[in-house]
Amino acid sequence: METGKPIIIGCDHAAYELKEKIKAYLMDKGYPVFDAGTKSQVSVNYVDFGKKVAHAVSKGKYSKGILLCGTGLGMSMVANRFAGVRAALCSDLFAAKMSRLHNDSNILVLGGRVLGDILAFEIIQTWLDTGFEGGRHLERIQTIDN
């Protein structure tokens, strides 16, 4: 993904600190970032923020999104309920690469209590730098959508 394309990001309280670091990382790399919240470490319902990001990606307002919660599990479950969303929970570089290459993931999900910031930055960069292979993988995505 070329820089300059906006990315929507959202989290719950458990991942607030990592989200703030990721926002700064992305902006330093030239990506405009829309922060869908949360805005502090005060306890919130992760579902509300997962829905905001997933809805925006589902409706085409943003082509890419990043969601974070404590483990990433809840956010990935929420996001994948939306049509056209392919949210991938990734905790390593290989998963991030393959989620784009074979699954054309459009939301990256990270666990704020699972990952350190350096690994999270590397996962994000791998995810953003990897394109979709298409071919038989497109057919599989279309089968899911149908």
Image: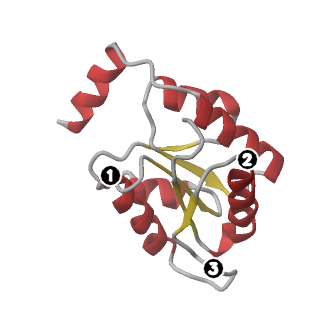
**How many angstroms separate mark 1 from mark 2 (CA)?**
25 Å
Q: Is 36 displayed left or right of 41 in the figure?
A: left
* Residue carrying label 1: 60
Residue visible at 63% across and 57% down? 71
Please, which residue is most extreme toward the left here? 146
Rendered-image quadrant of the C terminus: top left
- How crowded pointer 1 is (Cα within 10 Å; few <14, some 14-19, many 20+) is rated as few
Q: Residue at x 68, y 60 (%)?
A: 23
Would you say 22 lies left or right of 137 here?
right
CA gap between label 2 and label 3 equals: 20 Å
CA distance for labels 3 and 1: 24 Å
Which of the two residues, 32 or 77, is positioned nearer the viewer here?
32
Dividing the picture into quadrants, the one containing residue 132 is top left
Which quarter of the rendering shows the N terminus?
Answer: top right
Q: How busy is the neighbourhood of tag 3: few (under 14 within 10 Å), some, or many (20 plus)?
A: some
The residue beneath circle 3 is 39
Above-or-below relation of 105 to 22: above
Q: Nearer the viewer, residue 65 or 49?
A: 65
Q: State the residue position of label 2.
A: 120
Residue 109 x, y percent position in the rendering: 56, 50
Mark 1 and mark 3 in contact (Cβ < 8 Å)? Answer: no
Label 2 amino acid? Ala
Task: Check disc 1 and give the amino acid type.
Answer: Gly
| Crowd rating for badge 2 (residues with CA inside 10 Å; few <14, some 14–19, many 20+) | many
- In primary-sequence order, the first of circles 3 and 1 is 3
